[in-house]
Image (cartoon, rainbow, N blue to C red):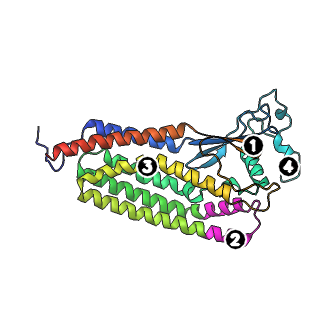
Amino acid sequence: MPAVSSSSPRQSVIVSGLSLLALGLMVAAYFTPMWWVSLTAPNYPADAFPDGIRILFSFTGVTNGCTTVPKTSRASQETQQEDLGWRSDEGKPPQKPEAALDCMHEMNTINHYVGMHPIGVGAPAERLMSRYIFGVLGVGLLAFAIGARKARVIVLGVGFVAVTGWMFFELHATDLLKTHVQTYMDDAGKYFRDADRIATWGTQLTTAITAISVVLVVLMVLITLASLKWEKFQLVLAVLPALLPVFFVGTFAAWLYFFGHNLHPWGAFTVKPFMPTVFGDGKVAQFSTHSYPMPGFAFLAGSALVSLVAVLRRRLELAEGSR
């Protein structure tokens, strides 16, 4: 068996296996809802809204969290959505879907009553750029699974070039950035009729996303160069993805604060600025609030834990090899 250089200790199969497992869990987390929030109140009875007014949060956006209305429910013939003014644009009788209630619509209606922004205003840059951030972190974890420095740097270089091409092609060649900003502006203008201010928000969002894409490119270059120069820098490749659970909860809490502290006078009811519940149960006016993690967050937390175990194991290997 050839001798292992003390400057480049052999990486164990355990570290490589843990890295790939962490990568798989991280990918699963991206495509799985991370958190759910629900509102319940007497005017939303359980037979009509068995899940309350429930929405699901993920890295890609917010989706309807309500399930099928029970066949025995009054809502199977007449939903609460109709009572709140849900009608077709053509003025014809609405064709109610049999499957599920539209709790995104219900939540926006409730938010409108207290002067809160529509849900689509939240985290516009994060929702679009998360795929590329996951791409960068995923390439890093894949490279961390490789023991040889030269091969690791090649994986980083090829992977980062691919992420960069993917990002700029989607954002600009396919007009994804333009479409995303327009959707954001449309959501912002559902109740807030100030075209000039919304146009400014759109410009700011375009600038922010462009800046983030440039920062990602610079970060990829720096990571590649640092990995080429310093053997121990490989540990950073697995530490960065381990920070994703903190990033998600911090961003989630920050946007909840934004929604609760940026109320507008259009609301039919006046409430004081408040901090929506991040985790657990709470109360806002006549509504009970519920906010809890979903399987996606468990996948992300598992990925972080496995990454840190791999880092500790590899750090020990590097320390033993340098003796």
Residue 172 in view (yes/no): no
Work out how far the residue at label 4 is from the one at label 1, CA to CA, in angstroms. 20 Å
Residue type at mark 3 is Leu
Asked if residue 37 is positioned above or below residue 137 in the image, the reply reads above
Q: Give the x, y percent position of residue 107.
A: 73, 47
Of helix, strand and loop, which mostly describes the magenta segment?
helix
Q: Residue furthest bottom?
A: 196
Circle number at residue 85: 4
Residue type at mark 4 is Gly
| Residue hosting label 3 | 243
Label 1: state its secondary structure: strand
In front of the other: label 2 or label 4? Answer: 2
Which corner quadrant holds the N terminus? top left
Q: Earlier in the sequence, mark 2 or mark 4?
A: 4
Label 3: state its secondary structure: loop
Question: Along the horizontal axis of the image, is 39 left or right of 305?
Answer: right
Q: Give the x, y percent position of residue 174.
A: 56, 61
Q: Earlier in the sequence, mark 3 or mark 1?
A: 3
| Residue hosting label 2 | 197
| Residue hosting label 1 | 287
The crowding category of the residue bearing disc 2, from other C-alpha atoms within 10 Å (few below 14, some 14 to 19, many at least 20), is few
Label 4: state its secondary structure: loop
Stretch in magenta: 178-203
Work out how far the residue at label 3 is from the one at label 4, CA to CA, in angstroms. 43 Å
Q: Is residue 143 magenta?
A: no
Work out how far the residue at label 3 is from the one at label 1, CA to CA, in angstroms. 33 Å
Q: Residue furthest right?
A: 92
Work out how far the residue at label 2 is from the one at label 3, CA to CA, in angstroms. 35 Å
